[in-house]
Amino acid sequence: MSTNIKEMKPRPFSLKVRILSALRFILDALTCVLFKLYYGTKGRKLPLIHDDILKQPAVEVARKIRAREISSVDVLNTCIQRIKETNPVTNYFIDNRFELALKEAKDADDLIKSGSLSIEYLEKEKPFLGVPFTTKDSIGVKGLHMTAGITLRKNCIADKNADVIELLKNSGAIIMGVTNVPEMCMWYESYNCIYGRTLNPYNTTRIVGGSSGGEGVIQTVGGSIFGIGSDIGGSIRMPAYFNGIFGHKPTRRAVSNKGQYPELKNDDVNLYLCVGPMTRFAVDLKHIQKVISGDCAKTLDLDKPVDIGKLKVFYQFSNGAPLMSEVDPEIKQAMVKVVEHFQLKHKIIAEEKKIEWLKRSQAIWFTTMKNEVPFAAYIMKNPSLASNITEIFKNILGLSGNTLIGLFVALTDQEKFNPESKKYKYFMEARDYLEEEFKTMLGEDGIFLFPTHPVPAPYHNQPLIRPMNFMYTAIINSLGLPATTVPLGLNSDGLPIGIQVVANLNKDRLCFAVAEELEKAFGGWFEPQSIKQS
């Protein structure tokens, strides 16, 4: 590095940016009233979970299957029934392999009944034997649709499993099907022109997040024992946050990305895109991560004990960036309670930070996402500026196969990728500086508490007024650090809120340990009761 990190400061924001930020704030305030009037305060109700097996961690379900306290077939049928009774309300599940899954579940039960392999062997070599799981519609599952929410791919069928699916199948887990995503997985509301919009179980007038939005929903309603998502800007952590579950973005390169769409043509994307677990229970995160990391699990050293009392805790309430919503007071209050918990129970005095370069989260993330293939090439047959504008007008008339936000993203992605430009080099250097600042701060035993999102789940389409709010998660992707979304209960409107816990590279185990600690202290996942839908 040419400059000491302490010497490099972000440039002041231009007058144009400050004016745009003020206008966005005013527009947001005005439209909040309109959204509430349009959608009302009550959503559709979901049936409650009646089978206790859906309220237990994946590791406990696996133990019971191995011990023959319950059969894999029974667990799978329970999940299928739960999907059938909740999917019509929230629209999260888009393709299944139930028949094949039932055959695999019977095979798992027969293997256990045979006694040919000891329980100890199965626990070590097949830790998720007979346990049903799901993943998003951009991660390949052989024989199932793999559209990534793109109309041009509506008939695409995966011809093989993604690496992560193969690793889980080798561990004995049974893949049931795939869940809904936004178009091209590049937005934080899960809506596309093939399968439609996914609705939040806590209040169906609200969004579920994206791009692993359908996966967030199936987990919180109990339709799957655990799930797998992918995250390039918060696509695991935001749906986990909006749906009140746990979601982990691993350390960069800790999990293979092979078998996703779009295919990675630039290896640099592996620095920012991650596959990770989504669960109702914190205890499952580590065990799933051990499987999906494959040979990389040794680097993460996930079984090394974590002494919570010896952690260094840092926190920051806001990134201070323009064009974003202010952090909701109830989220700040929840973070204060977490800080107080560490002080009261573990005598840890947390240190508040104000990291200057977080103000430039947008510029850094967009720079790291620069690609030689324009966004429009993925979602349109003959991409051009003219065809893009035409599709926008067609969308307004309800005649386009593309989403409005997808077309807007394509329209703004017209600048050719130039790695030699001064702007690109400046913000890549800024990214390097910010990573070093985090690594120096976190060291071997530090965690950083940060909002997952500045507000609870918005109304449907409201993200169009708040397009940059995902930067709270996206900047962590740019740095390659591990981060776990931790639910901290429901707000006064009955919507989930929480924070993300960030650790240093390869210190994912710190995130997991803190997630388990905070789950015990604050209750973790709460089933959507459909009692308070306001």
Image: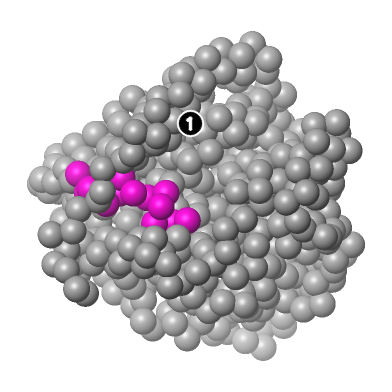
What residue appears at the point 80 percent right and 32 percent down from the top-left corner?
396
| x and y, in percent, of residue 417 in the image | 54, 67
Which structural element holds mark 1? loop
Residue 67 is drawn in which quadrant? bottom right
Quick one: 64 or 352, which is closer to the camera? Answer: 352
Compared with 475, 488 (above or below) is above
Q: Residue furthest bottom?
A: 116
Residue drawn at x 78%, y 64% is: 146
Image label count: 1
Could you say where residue 58 lies in the image, as x and y percent from the top left? 56, 59
Q: Is residue 438 left or right of residue 277?
A: left
The residue identified by callout 1 is: 456
Say if the magenta span includes residue 365. yes
Magenta stretch in the rendered image? 354-366
Q: Nearer the viewer, residue 359 or 303?
A: 359
Query: Up-down: is 444 above or below 166?
Result: above
State yes or no: residue 2 in magenta.
no
Quadrant in which the C terminus appears: top right
Q: Residue at x 17, y 63 (%)?
A: 5
Residue 31, position as x, y percentages in the image: 57, 18
- The answer to whether 11 appears left or right of 408 in the picture is left
Of 37 and 443, nearer the camera is 37
Q: Nearer the viewer, residue 418 or 222?
A: 418
Give neighbour class at mark 1: few <14, some 14-19, many 20+ (Cα, 10 Å). many
Question: Which quadrant holds the N terminus?
Answer: bottom left
Q: Is residue 330 left or right of residue 121?
A: left
Q: Main secondary structure of the magenta part?
A: helix
Q: What amino acid is at disc 1?
A: Pro
On the question of residue 64 being in view, the answer is no
Looking at the image, is 18 positioned above or below residue 13? Answer: above
